[in-house]
Amino acid sequence: MGRRPMGDTRRRQILEGLLRAVAKHGLRECNMSRVADEAKLSRGILHYYFSDKEEMLGALVDHLREENFRHFAGSVGRMKGPWERLRSVLRYPARRFGRERGAMLAKVWVEFWGLSSENERVREFVLRLQSDLRELLRLLIQDGQDQGVFRRDVPAKHLATILMGALEGMVLQWRFAPREAPFAATARSLERVLERVLRG
């Protein structure tokens, strides 16, 4: 059956409910009933718009990608130099994970990672989220190299991949040992190290 377009309010209500359900119960134990409870909607309404959980997860990934894009488009556009633009992207996770919503997103991200090795659809979702940020980092680093601000002896693509690994590793460590790996403080240290590496 074809799905009717959802209004912005209803769409956010369902997807935010899914986000809370995954954070609370994990991907394996998250089902339509639990999503309906978190969204404060009936299961019938959820099934009217989504045929199953995987379809909902795909919509959630797109929802988060759009949210990230809106932030990056605004923050990067306000900065003048290559380093300032790159730094604004690096500071986004620190600001986000320092809030209640950020902690919930970190739980969900770890859940996606955990199932990505055994579930092809979940792996596709993870790759979609990763590819956006990796490409943005590559473009910003390449711009700095083209302007002679960043070192040129390492390809921008490799530097972006290394930086992605550092950011994702920080999320994992903060998720499991927040006292030993406080995200904001570690992110500031990463920023200082990265500036020295990029500027040579």
Image (cartoon, grey):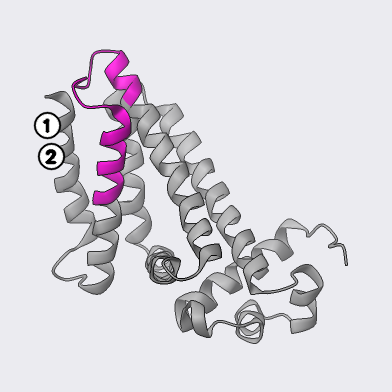
Task: Give the magenta part as a residue range.
Answer: 142-166
User: Residue 85, image x and y in percent?
Assistant: 34, 30
The answer to whether 140 is drawn above or below residue 55 in the figure is above
- The three-letter code of the residue at mark 1 reads Arg
Q: Which residue sits at x=26%, y=35%?
A: 159
In this rendering, position of residue 52 left or right of residue 25: right
- In the rendered structure, the answer to whether residue 50 lies left or right of residue 156 reads right
> Does the magenta run of residues contain 70?
no
> Residue at the location (20% across, 72% down)?
177
Q: Give the structural element (helix, strand or loop) at label 2.
A: helix
Q: Mark 2 = which residue?
A: 193
Image spot of residue 54 (x, y percent):
63, 69
Q: Quadrant of residue 186?
A: bottom left
Label the magenta part by its dominant secondary structure. Answer: helix
Residue 128, horizontal then vertical, whole percent: 51, 50
For residue 107, what is the image quadrant?
Answer: bottom left
The residue labelled by disc 1 is: 196
User: Real-space Cα distance between discs 2 and 1?
Assistant: 5 Å
